[in-house]
Amino acid sequence: MIEVKDVKKSFGQKILFECKSLIFGKKGIYIIKGPNGCGKTTFLKMLFGKDKEYSGRIHNLFKKNIMLPQQPYFFRGSVEYNLALALSHERLKSAQEVLKMFGVPLKTNINQLSAGQRQLVSFLRAFYIPSDVLFLDEPDSFLDKDVKEFVYRLIEDEAQKRCIIVVTHHQSATLRGNMIYFENGQIIIEGDVAR
Ligand SMILES: Nc1ncnc2c1ncn2[C@@H]1O[C@H](COP(=O)(O)OP(=O)(O)OP(=O)(O)O)[C@@H](O)[C@H]1O
């Protein structure tokens, strides 16, 4: 669980956003939306514990936290090598099956993949690491509709077991979950709604 109470985030004199009260449960999907620059990535980093410069309280009780940033880091080497560094044997196999299904070559150097293919690899690497909470910062921006549908279904199934918090504004396919909006500098939750 993550509890957010009376949080205010500023850069210098400028208040970026405020959040009066918000609770992220042990399971479920939380979809964070809002216009460019409103503070979605900043908020995700605060929840994750990377950004501690704010007033108010964020109490993150999750033990194992995993974050997929907008620009994930890869090691020099093949797709398979990058996955094998992060995943256990069983989970590596699951990731490989998905990549084969979408025609992503496993032996190819990671830098030779398209942006969408690389994004799928980075998503699977983060997704298959066991965690109590998974933070996803725009995991879908380069994915085509079919891959996106598949990724969203994976997220939905998995959210029955753990908490998944997703920043996205690219929802041509549907991801269902609790919607959290940035509106005029306030963070507001809108319950269990689609889209
Ligand atoms: N370290 C920093 N110092 C000053 N301003 C910052 C810093 N980090 C972020 N900002 C500003 O805070 C605002 C919110 O940035 P953030 O990346 O959280 O937005 P976002 O909602 O994720 O945007 P996008 O949808 O474009 O990804 C931006 O205007 C950004 O320039």
Image (cartoon, rainbow, N blue to C red):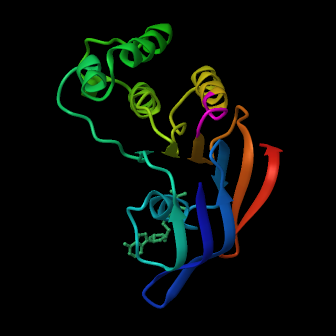
Region in magenta:
158-162
- Examine the structure image and report whether residue 161 is included in the region drawn in magenta: yes
Residue drawn at x 40%, y 26% is: 121
Residue drawn at x 42%, y 87% is: 12
| Residue lying at the far bottom of the rendered structure | 13
In the depicted structure, whether residue 109 falls above or below residue 40: above
In the depicted structure, whether residue 38 falls above or below residue 2: below
Q: What secondary structure do most residues of the magenta stretch adopt?
A: loop
Residue 53 horizontal side relative to residue 187, left or right:
left
In the depicted structure, whether residue 68 falls above or below residue 17: above
Residue 42 percent coordinates (x, y): 48, 64
Q: How many circles with numbers are drawn on the protein? A: 0
| Residue lying at the far left of the rendered structure | 76
Q: In which quadrant will I find the N terminus? A: bottom right
- Residue 151 falls in which quadrant of the image? top right
Residue 7 horizontal side relative to residue 171, left or right:
left
Q: In which quadrant will I find the C terminus? A: top right
Residue 26 percent coordinates (x, y): 62, 46
- Residue 45 falls in which quadrant of the image? bottom left
Residue 106 horizontal side relative to residue 188, left or right:
left
- Camera-side residue of 179 and 108: 179
- Camera-side residue of 141 and 24: 24
Residue 81 percent coordinates (x, y): 23, 21
- Examine the structure image and report whether residue 109 is included in the region drawn in magenta: no
- Residue 122 falls in which quadrant of the image? top left
In the depicted structure, whether residue 120 falls above or below residue 195: above
Residue 72 horizontal side relative to residue 74, left or right:
right
Residue 160 percent coordinates (x, y): 67, 32
Residue drawn at x 39%, y 14% is: 90
Residue drawn at x 61%, y 64% is: 3
